[in-house]
Amino acid sequence: MADNTQYITQILESIGSVYSGTSSYSNNGVLGSEDPSLKTSMALSTGEFAQNPYLVGSLIRRRTLPPGAQPAPVKITSATFSSSTYNNTTENWRVRISLPASSTFRSSPLLKPLVDTDNSMIWPTTPNITLSHSASYNMLNLLHTNYAFPTYQNSQVDPIAVAGSFPVQSISDGQYWVAAIHYLRSVSKMHYGETSDKGSPPPMVKLNGYGDFVFNNVPCVVTNFTVDLQSGVDYIRVPLLGESGNTEEFTYVPTDSTIQVTLQPIYSRGKVSAFSFDEFVNGNLRGEGYI
């Protein structure tokens, strides 16, 4: 051990002699005289060399750097991910579609993951949303005129397309994906067969997202939804939920897929009659679902 220490010391002394020559920079950054601050920063103890001999190569590469050219130390901050579970005490601005106010939906074992997120289907990532409004005019074409006269007919909110990625990294994520697909299948069907509310149309849902202005309790019906099951992603085995928890049944869920939902805003005749243009312009109908 003593011989190794002596050998290391000789190497460090030889390196030090290189830095004391004419190869070091001066204080003004010109090759020539020795820079004491640079020499101090290049000091290397025998113990440091024994722990990491690669420091010698680092010193050799730094010998041509002018004073102050060494990179500044980088401060690393740890990142943490917040839970995806909805918390009523925090502001929830994520895009989501509510479950219908029906005991059938609220008590379904497959839909329990959606019940746990404030009775809503929430996109785990920020989705792409296409929103458009239309005002229809009939063109009145008079004889022997250069310009037509548009006469107003009506206004409407066009279908809203929401498309977002659904990453799945765990069994709980997979069960949420299953719940979302089952929910969309259910809200796009009428009450048919031996069931409650026989003959009723598909249920109405509420669209929310981005706070109190963009989408605030907008009443909608689901007119279409698509899911892409890609071939280039992995699939994980997910147990299905039953009344008492996980069952022996299972399904395979893609680790990444895109779910796109088309929503048509819908207002009852009473809701349309209660609309006030002045109140809408003044922003007093934000929580009423009008957009």
Image: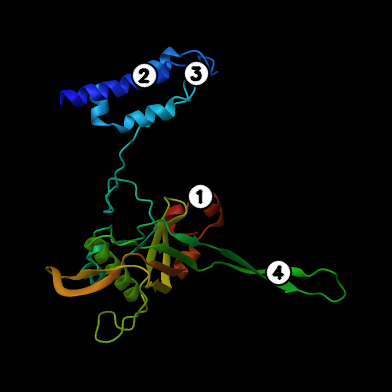
| Residue 43 in view in this figure | no
Q: Position of residue 83 (x, y in %)?
A: 27, 50
Q: Give the mark toward the camera: 3 or 1.
A: 3
Q: Residue at x 46, y 51 (%)?
A: 213
Query: Mark number for residue 151?
Result: 4
Per the model, the C-alpha gap separating discs 2 and 4 is 90 Å
Label 3 element class = loop
Could you tell me if the residues under marks 4 and 3 are in contact, i.e. CB atoms within 8 Å? Answer: no
Of pointers 1 and 2, the one earlier in the residue sequence: 2
| Foreground pick, 176 / 216 | 176
Q: Residue at x 32, y 75 (%)?
A: 186
Residue tagged by mark 2?
A: 16
* Image coloring type: rainbow
Q: Amino acid at mark 4?
A: Thr
Q: Position of residue 274 (x, y in %)?
A: 48, 62
| Residue 55 in view in this figure | yes
Per the model, the C-alpha gap separating discs 1 and 4 is 27 Å
